[in-house]
Image (spheres, rainbow, N blue to C red):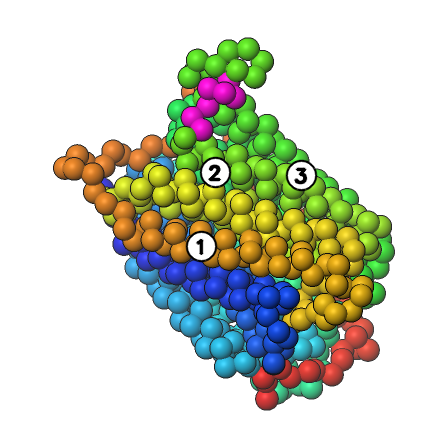
Amino acid sequence: MFHARKLVLAHFWVAFVAFLGALVLGAWQMYVRSPLWTWINNPEHYYRSVTAHGTVMAYVLPTLVAMGFGYAITELSLRRPLIGVRWAWAGFWLLIVGTVMAAVTMGLGKASVLYTFYPPMLASPFYYFGVVLVVVGSWVWVALMSINLRAWKKDNPGVPVPLAMFGNVAGAYLWAWTSVGAATEVIVLILPASLGLTDTINAGLARVFFSWTLHAIVYFWLMPSYIVFYTIVPRAIGGRLYSDTMGRVAFALFLVFSMPIGIHHLFADPQVGVGFKFVHAAMTAMVSIPTLLTVFTIVASVEIAGRLRGGRGLFGWVKALPWDEPMMLAVTFSFVMLGFGGAGGLINMSMQLNETIHNTQWVTGHFHLIFAGAIVLMYFMAAYELWPQLTGRIPSRGLVKVQVWLWFVGMMVLSMPWHLVGLLGMPRRMAYYDYTHPDLHTQAWTVTVSALGGFTLLASGVLLVWILATARKRGTAAVEPFTFSRPAHPVTHTPLALNGLGLWVGMMIALTVVNYGYPIAQLASIKEASVPVIPIGSR
């Protein structure tokens, strides 16, 4: 019996309803910036919208999905009731209160600082209090994942931890350590200034603390998607997981390599020395290792499915794959967008090449392909897979395929023009452009195309909510029990290092201290680093 059913449903519904609202804002932003509409009368409205869009997409959506999916994984993979359901509900309501508090503040125009905060700009303290509540609510989830895993291991000594739970808890630990940077920035530096206790803020130190969170949060976002890749995709397409061990290695390496790399976002910032920028650039390259392991493992798992379906020859298995299955389409589209987005990331991580695209639309295209494309698409599939267990109803297979296609096409149409104009130097985060200017006139069509992509994505988001809301029961047959993918080779023994996360968490913390300790200590000791605050709806 699925004891946490209502808990998981609550997380998913709030996540996707908030997501739909953020999609509306995103489509509106593209429309008002395009030649299809005259200049926006008040540019603050644009930045208000960007702040709300980013806050929902970066904090609310992935956190709720990770929490809800995590609670489901705990019960389904460990085959026991979730420990601490009341605490889980408390964490959920903390997150809801924080989301509403931040949303109201943004809606009133008192927090138009974007989700990256950007001190010395300061929002109303209520915005930051809301974000803090969201994070604290998520920390309840982190604690519960650790408690449930520890209890299961105590009752099952020496038994391999199910891969889905291993990845789930790895994601929880990654988020716990990742969020420390932004939490420290808000509590120690931003809130005192926002409350009027000081008129200055160490903006350089604040940016370094946020970089602690800024890139590692991407890998927290992708953990649920990678869990779907490893533990659901092979089963859904009729195959086997090529290697359980490879999945454990990938999840462990994400813990180690995700954290000490965020300063590559500060290549243009003068307050950080070149030496540490180089170190973070080099470490950023290392995070490609677990991604490449995942691509190899999942492609091999897909090949197994093709071979089991009768595929022969070098590429005959590709034709034999179940291309009419929504999951097959989704994983293919996700890998395509991950490939394009990852290739763009190689430019961002290079100190030299980054200079050509820094703060341009290229950057916007890159992270939309990675997060909104490759990652969010698999959030949809996780919900579709769990929906029969949660509601007893099965989503329409035909509509799911249409929704997946719309999301893929919309994201490619939205983001590819951004890469092109980014190379031409078009800046991001601009409320409007003067398309009558001869240097900008030739780029106007790209913004129109991206706007069309944005509205396609909105249509896909509306269809997602419609599919979930109108899923129907099929006859009187009971819903089949949920199963995870079976490995090609049964797992009878797992090395100790890959059956727990203590070693990897220790390495993650150690590398973070090494890569961030000196820059933080240096900037904190320089009194001249503080600058006057710039209230945006504050004080």
Check disc 2 and give the amino acid type.
Answer: Ala
- The residue closer to the viewer here, 128 or 393, is 393
Q: Earlier in the sequence, mark 1 or mark 3?
A: 3
Please state the extent of the stretch shown in magenta in the rendering. 317-323
Q: Residue at x 55, y 10 (%)?
A: 313
Residue 156 shown in magenta:
no
The answer to whether one can see residue 41 in this image is yes
Which residue position is annotated with label 3? 288
Quadrant hosting residue 164: top left
User: Is 247 left, or right, of 120 in this rendering?
Assistant: left
Q: Which mark is residue 330?
A: 2
- Helix, strand, or loop for circle 3? helix
Check disc 1 and give the amino acid type.
Answer: Ala
Specify few, some or many for label 3: CA neighbours under 10 Å numbering under 14, 14-19, or 20 or more.
some
Q: Residue at x 64, y 45 (%)?
A: 341
* Residue 481 screen position, x and y as percent: 26, 34
Quadrant hosting residue 40: bottom right
